Amino acid sequence: METLENIFGVGQNLTVWQMSVRAFVTFFITLFLIRIAGMRSIGKKSAFDTIITIMLGAVLSRVIVGASSFFSTVAAGFVIAIVHRLLAMIAVKHEWLEKIIKGQQRQLYSNGKINWANMHRSSVSESDLIESVRLLANTTSLNDIDEAYIESNGEISIIKKKGNYNGTYPL
């Protein structure tokens, strides 16, 4: 037991070596917890998925600096990962829950008209919309697009009008 205390330290008065060892171990614990939470927790970039990143970082950083006990902090991280995974699994089967925790897309533009109510609700300006049209559809005119949406992850997606393909869609 004394050997472990020498390696990992106790409390907040830790040496550089002890904090480094704690960081090394915590890295692999965090990797394991992210695997439990599921790959979507990193790839989807929605608010629901960002929460796990922030919470795990906040909780597990306490292990590295010695602000909380090792096992109780790792247990808290485990609970966060399991709750995230369970909610994601339940949301797959229940659309109402998916809308609550993950959000849903909103139409910003259609049939030649900007949906100002959805633009305001989503905090998207007209210049934000035009910028996305330039970046995603390679055009400067709303007349060249059919629809625009703000997706649940906050990104704007553009659907070009049929027949407007110019061979330069971004990858």
Image (tube, rainbow, N blue to C red):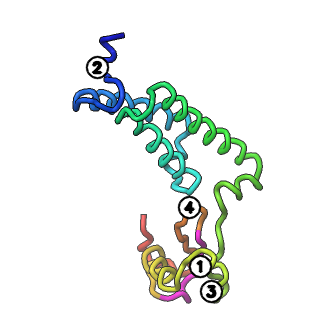
Q: Which mark identifies residue 141?
A: none
Q: Which residue is mark 2?
A: 7
Q: Which residue is mark 1?
A: 162
Kindly identify the amino acid type of the residue bearing the numbered disc 3. Answer: Ile
Kindly identify the amino acid type of the residue bearing the numbered disc 1. Answer: Lys
Q: CA distance from mark 4 to mark 2?
A: 42 Å
Height in image: 84 above or below 113? above
Q: CA distance from mark 2 to mark 3?
A: 61 Å
Q: Quadrant of the C terminus?
A: bottom left
Height in image: 120 above or below 32? below
Height in image: 140 above or below 15? below
**Nearer the viewer's eye, disc 3 or disc 1?**
3
Q: State which tag comes first along the sequence, 4 or 2.
A: 2
Residue at x-position 61% and y-position 42%: 84
Asked which quadrant contains residue 17, the reply is top left
Q: Which residue is mark 4?
A: 153
Contact? badges 3 and 1 (CB < 8 Å): no
Q: Which mark identifies residue 114?
A: 3
Contact? badges 4 and 2 (CB < 8 Å): no
For disc 1, the neighbor class at 10 Å (few under 14, some 14 to 19, many from 20) is few
Q: Is residue 147 magenta?
A: yes
Left or right, 119 with respect to 33, comes to: right
Q: CA distance from mark 1 to mark 2?
A: 65 Å
Q: Which residues are magenta?
A: 141-150
Mark 2 element type: helix
